Image (cartoon, rainbow, N blue to C red):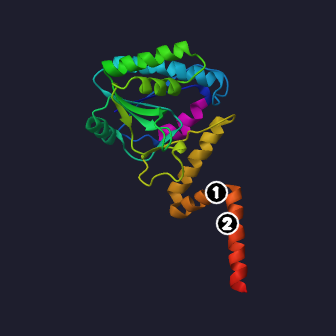
Amino acid sequence: MKIFCCHTKSHERLLTDYFKPSLPPDLELHAIPREGDGTGDFRSDQWIKCLHNKIDMVVGTIRDHCGEIIIWSDIDILFFRPVAKELEALIQASGKEILFQRERNGIPDINGGFYVLRANEKTLAFFEQVRAGLAANPDVDDQFIINTLLRACPNFAWGYLPFSYYARTHGWPPPRDLAIFHANGIMGKNSIELNISQFKEILWIRKYGRLALLLSCVAKIPKRCKRVWAERLSRHACKNAA
């Protein structure tokens, strides 16, 4: 199965050090370099421009691979097992034209960073609408337009990937049957280093298992909650000592 992605020089480290080395052998990578200055931080002008260019490329790949099932992916993603047969089975069984990652648990919004689609006239028409929406709204990203159109097009058949196709915005901890890890939810500056820190954490957990996962969960407990639990444990210890 063909997997497509695009990247600028600012994100090349994610591609070469993490995305490509994790790619399973059942996926055929087509990585498209794009020109661009700057750091590529979230919501930066370069970031917005790259996402607009990405949709031009999505339209082109659908035209060029009509009749195939293809993947479009961001490069802030790690793979943990072969996925081609599973993704093909999922989209065939669903009867949908495209399956997206969910943005968060409990809300209908999709995440535009990883999706599998049937390259056909329906998906081509949909992404041409996405491109038109971006042209009319140059300050927004592709995910905003995609979600807007999905709400407005009830007859377009789409669905969600299972949570094993996990994004960091799905909450913590990740599922045990992890297929991919999408290091999203990055805000502000130094976004590449933040992506990498998420990669390092999930790789550490995968290497050291349940204890590492438990420690990571404890580390994410808000400080106020930690203080409350520390006080309760202290009182409990004092009571038992008495």
Camera-side mark, 1 or 2: 2
CB-based contact (under 8 Å), mark 1 and mark 2:
yes
Instruction: Please report the residue visible at 31 percent of the width from the left and 35 percent of the height from the top.
Output: 91
Q: Which residues are magenta?
A: 11-21
Q: Is residue 2 visible?
A: no
Residue 12 within the magenta-colored segment of the rendering: yes
> Compared to 132, does 82 lie above or below?
below
**Nearer-the-camera pick, 207 or 229:** 229
- Compared to residue 116, the image places residue 138 above or below, namely above
Label 1 secondary element: loop
Which residue in the rendered view is the most extreme toward the bottom? 242
Is residue 158 something one can see in this rendering? yes
State which quadrant residue 16 falls in.
top right
Task: Judge by depth and name the residue closer to the eye, 138 or 42.
Answer: 138
Q: Amino acid at mark 2?
A: Trp
Residue to which mark 1 is pinned: 221
Disc number at residue 229?
2
Nearest to N terminus: mark 1 or mark 2: 1
**Measured from the top left, where is residue 189 in percent x and y?**
69, 34
Q: Quadrant of the C terminus?
A: bottom right
Residue at the image position 59 percent from the left and 46 percent from the top: 198
Residue 30's quadrant in the figure?
top left
Q: Position of residue 180 (x, y in %)?
A: 45, 44
Q: Label 2: how many residues lie within 10 Å, few (<14), some (14-19) or many (20+)?
A: few
Tally of numbered discs: 2
**Quarter of the image with the N terminus in it:** top left
**x and y percentages locating residue 133 in the rendered image:** 50, 16
Q: Amino acid type of disc 1? A: Ile
Q: Secondary structure at mark 2?
A: helix
